[in-house]
Each structure stands twice: as C-alpha cells, then as structure tokens.
Image: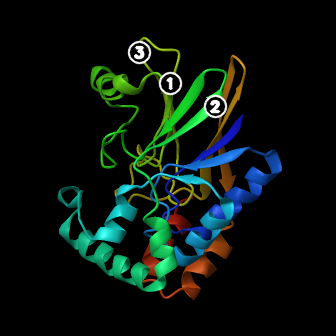
Amino acid sequence: MKLIVLSDVHGNCFALETALADMKKIGFDHIVCNGDMVQGGSQPHETVMLLREMNCSIVMGNSDAWLMTGVETDAHLIPEERRKKLDVVRDWSLSKLDEEDRAFINTFQLTVSMDLGAGRSLLAFHGSPTSFDQFLLPSTPEDEFQEILKPYADHILTGGHMHLQYTRRLRDSQNFFFNPGSVGVAYNHEQTNPDGLLDPWAEYAVLTVEGAQVNLEFRRIPLDMEKMAEVYRKSDRPFAETAMEQYTCYE
C-alpha cells in the first residue's frame, strides 16, 4: 500500500493543489489528512471542495474544531492581540462556508486508523491520540514522548499540529511516529527571526508498505509565491497582506 499523509493545510487551497499535482505524479492508494485543513488561509470554501474531490480520510485538528465550535482550547498559549486577529479571521472563514461545507468539516474524526496490510496498521491524529492540542516535538523528552504514545505502539503513528517533518522510533516496538509537516504553513521551529517566517513550499509524506518492507519519504514541493500572493490579494480575507509577508520576506 502506498499512502499519502498530509497535514495542516489551514485553508491554503493553492498549496494543496500544488501538493496534489505532485502526489498524482508519484501515484498513491489513499490519502490521510492529520487535521487543521480549513481554518486560517484565504480559501476555506475552496479547500473543502478540493478535499471532497480527494475522497481522503480526515482527522479533526484544533483549529477546525475551534472554527466549528468557537471553543478556544488553546487560548492560554496565544497572545491577546493575536487572538483578536484570529477571531476576526474565524468570523470571515465561517462567512465563506455554506451548510454543506460545515457538515463536511463536522465529519472529521479525532483519530483515523488504516489497515496497511502485512499485519501493520496506521493510527493518525492531530496533536496526540488523546488531544488535538498536545505538542509532540523532536525535543519532547524521551520518557514523556514514549509514555504518551506507548498505548498505541502496535501501530505506525502519525500526527500533525507542529508543522514540522520528523520521525521518532517507538520504544520496545518495530513501529515509529512521524509528522508529515504542513502543506499550507510550513516553517522552521529553530529560526532566529522573532516574526516566525514561513517556508515557501508544501510538505507531505509518503508511507509505502510492501510485505515486511516499510518506506517513509518526506517531500517538499516549491510554491509559486507570486501566484499564491495573488490568491491572497484577490481574497477579502482580513490581514491578507500581513499573512503573505510571512512568506515573501523569507529568503
């Protein structure tokens, strides 16, 4: 089985289209999305429409749950000024979604499991299997990381939320955890710039299982930044120019 795993599109349909074109070139059996598909970018409705066409399995992320419910599960982590801007963007995003779009988002699951054949399975989630807000990073202390994932170590595990491509082995298991990165908002956690500049590419992963052989590939597909900037400018998304500046000044 050849599985595409992607995450954190955040309403950037242009980036999703770019990544999907690359996926079609390499071929795949199914697509799994690790959450945060719709909220944040300039194309929430367009993103929902494309996801429907893709017929993929989709995890509910914290941002899309907040979009649907208004319940701020991570409000304590976000400065007040930024939270006010996020609230404005949320209201705008909701205004772009029709009832079918909202019903579709509400079908997203907290976890998604897939049979990979050869006695292997995949468990997909956003933050962790028990919380879409939980942080799992390369720097998470080993014992803490293993304790969180130990109950699920009979699966290959994949999460999103961190917008960062990486993998870690599961203790006392043949399996591993991986994060496919972000399609729509990739960024370098270790950058020195305090503004949190964004990378000009879409990220995803390809998991291939053939009998006892398992292969994991991380892919980065360059984005046409001029075209993406035009998409943002043509939208009436609040703070569109500020959002694009995070990409265009990253050189």
Give the answer, above or below, for where 191 lies relative to 249.
above
Which quadrant holds the C terminus? bottom right
Q: Position of residue 167 (x, y in %)?
A: 51, 30
Numbered mark located on residue 171 in the image = 3
Q: Position of residue 244 (x, y in %)?
A: 51, 73
Q: Is residue 223 visible?
A: no
Residue 210, quarter of the rendered image: top right
Q: Earlier in the sequence, mark 1 or mark 3?
A: 3
For mark 2, give the secondary structure.
strand
Dot in front, 3 or 2:
2
- Neighbour tally class for label 1: few under 14, some 14-19, many 20 plus, Cα within 10 Å: some
Numbered mark located on residue 176 in the image = 1
Left or right: 27 as drawn, with respect to 177: right
- Residue assigned mark 2: 116
Q: Earlier in the sequence, mark 3 or mark 2?
A: 2
Q: Is residue 109 visible?
A: yes
How much space separates mark 1 and mark 3, taking CA atoms?
9 Å
Amino acid type, callout 3? Arg
Left or right: 125 as drawn, with respect to 175: left
At 45% across and 58% down in the image, what residue appears?
36
